[in-house]
Image (cartoon, rainbow, N blue to C red):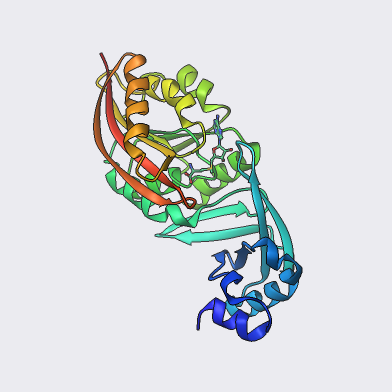
Amino acid sequence: MELRDFLEARIPGAPRRLLPARAKRIGGVALLRLRPELEELGRELAEAVKEFYRVRAVYLIRGVEGVERMPRLELLAGEPVTEIVHREYGCVYKLDLTRLMFCLGNSFERMRIAGLTSRGEVVVDMFAGVGQFTIPIAVLGEPEKVYAIEINPVAHRYLLENAGLNGVEDRVEALLGDCREVASERLAGAADRVVMGYFGGTIEALPAALSTLKPEGGLIHFHELARRGGEEDLISKIMRNAIKCGFQVRLISWRTVKSYSRTKNHVVVDFLAAKE
Ligand SMILES: C[S@@+](CC[C@H](N)C(=O)[O-])C[C@H]1O[C@@H](n2cnc3c(N)ncnc32)[C@H](O)[C@@H]1O
């Protein structure tokens, strides 16, 4: 049975077309988005969602704030749960759900990048979060080192903890600060591969990301939102900016990570760059 069928049977009168088709489930908690028309029925719906998924708590997602992507959640059913442990493809991620984001829709991309990383590489993860890319790369890719830069002290603390939980603390160096400064000041010329897992201004960190590449060059994985059909414009913009920084570039590929809204996708662009 689908969630929508269950809710329709439980709450007669709630218009079916407005009912959520699913809720995000992570660490025994459900995170629910509700159409404004249904907010009055929020608690009733959340109790039903809790029963349907057999989770400890159901939170309403009210939005995500700031560069740190802090979620705004409201507990609608069950007990308050903050810290959770999420397991994915042999990696473990601990985080406080009420203060940090963890996007389940990026799981294939996490595995793709870990799979591309060769033994002995040096990787820079510019927007490391709690280690969404750093941990699978360190666990599955056998790099020499992953330098993981994170601006939010809360996320940075979990990043350190997650490196320990996954037994890769010797391969991960977690750096607290703004990647636009930390990368160029501390990691110039160090990297074979740079992950830029962020959207809404990733281009601002491109000069710093490029500065971390080894003299022979390396690979950049650049994330951003793109209008559907407008991906070529984004790619041209990235390439133009890298060339302006004095780099030769070669596009390898791009792919859609996930749908973001009715008109936009989250995409990742892979390209090679080397100093001219
Ligand atoms: C949405 S999370 C993404 C985490 C991970 N890269 C992924 O793609 O799943 C973005 C992270 O980038 C961090 N961040 C934002 N601006 C930053 C900056 N200038 N330097 C370092 N970290 C930054 C935020 O605090 C947040 O933890």
Q: Is residue 122 visible?
A: no
Q: Position of residue 249 (x, y in %)?
A: 26, 24
Q: Is residue 217 above or below residue 26?
A: above
Residue 150 figure quarter: top right
In this picture, is 6 found above or below 76?
Answer: below
Q: In the rendered image, is residue 178 in sight?
A: yes
Q: Residue furthest bottom?
A: 9
Looking at this view, is 226 or 128 the one in front? 226
Ligand 1 is found in which quarter of the picture? top right
Residue drawn at (50%, 84%) of the image: 1
Q: Residue 122, located in which quarter of the rendered image?
A: top left
Which residue sits at x=50%, y=36%? 127
210 sits to left or right of 1: left
Of 2 and 229, nearer the camera is 229
Using the rendered view, name the quadrant where residue 20 is placed: bottom right
Q: Is residue 49 above or below residue 87?
A: below
Horizontally, residue 239 falls left or right of residue 41, namely left
Q: Position of residue 58 (x, y in %)?
A: 67, 67
Residue at 53% x, 48% y is: 162
Is 188 displayed left or right of 177 in the figure? left
